[in-house]
Image: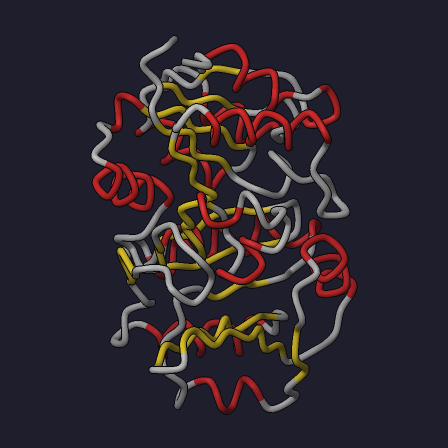
Amino acid sequence: MGDVRLVAFDLDGTLLDDRGRMSNESVGALRRLALSGIAMASISGRNVGKSLAPFLPDLRPALHVGSYNGAMVLGTGADGERSLLYEQRLPADGFPDLVDFVGNSGVNFIYCRCETDRSGLSEAYLTDEETAWIRNLVRMTGVNIVLEPDLLSMARDLVPPPKMILLPGPGRREGLFERMRAAFGRRFYLARTGDDRIEIMHPEVNKAVALREICDACGVAPSQSLAIGDGDNDLPMLKAAGIGVLMGNADRLTRDSAAGAGVRMCGSLAHEGFSKTVARYVSDG
């Protein structure tokens, strides 16, 4: 498959394990892509800073970055000098209704603050309560989460973020997800992530949008892209790519959703699904 000119990938569960580490084989695969002149894109639910943090200094400048599930997309280059290719925050007219729903549901949440000014990009995750699910997210991503007990009462007056995260835990996640779909319909894009979280973005945001923006910036047709992911939020990207591959460690709901959509399967993270997929579909030139 020598016509692949861009490789896009999710991070947690695809490239990174539950401690935020990538294997030596995956690092080698990324370096071979860079040496071959094949464009690379990290497209994840993480913020910009934590999207770049796992990569060694020689690889970071070569990466395009799609963060917040595609709500913010940046080009290649040195940190602080990347061009902003796309930005879409939660809709201002729907954000107060979302805050009310969160309050009435009594669910732990994260407000993903992201601001740009002349000094660059400023990001922070704010939460109203420290829970086991918050601690799990910190352990997995290394993100710094600021505790703000009055966050719910403050939220209405804050600028709509690129993403909100609800953390009901595994036992409540599916029930809350269905309630949100009934309450909001198409007003937001809802995605299941991990087994304990729901992520909420603008209805026009998803990872396929990020993939298309990056393809345009690179002068690459989407049909010339390979995309690899493991989660429900990766499916739009996998379906939009020329070759979309779902990791073997994807959960049952995600595998069921991918069935019949032209998405291929590969091995699990533990069995080097990422590096073997790159080797299978990408020529070294």
| Residue at figure coordinates x 60%, y 16% from the top left | 276
Quarter of the image for the C terminus: give it: top left
* Residue located 49% across and 35% down the image: 9
Q: Is residue 22 left or right of residue 14?
A: right
In the image, is residue 119 above or below residue 90?
below
Q: Position of residue 140 (x, y in %)?
A: 72, 52
Q: Is residue 34 above or below residue 156?
A: above
Residue positioned 47% across, 75% down in the render = 113
> Where residue 175 appears, x then y in whole percent?
57, 51
Image coords of residue 53 (percent x, y):
61, 55
User: What colouring does the structure picture have?
Assistant: secondary structure
Examine the rendered structure and indicate whether residue 72 appears above or below residue 34.
Answer: below
| Residue situated in front as seen by the camera: 72 or 25 | 25
**Which quarter of the rendering shows the N terminus?**
top left
Q: How many marks?
A: 0
Which residue: 56% across, 63% down?
Answer: 166
Residue 132, compared with residue 259, is above or below; it is below
Q: Is residue 174 left or right of residue 86?
A: right
Nearest the eye: 186 or 80 = 80
Camera-nearest residue between 55 and 245: 55
Q: Foreground: 17 or 33?
A: 33
- Image position of 275 (left or right of 283): right
Q: Position of residue 68 (x, y in %)?
A: 45, 57
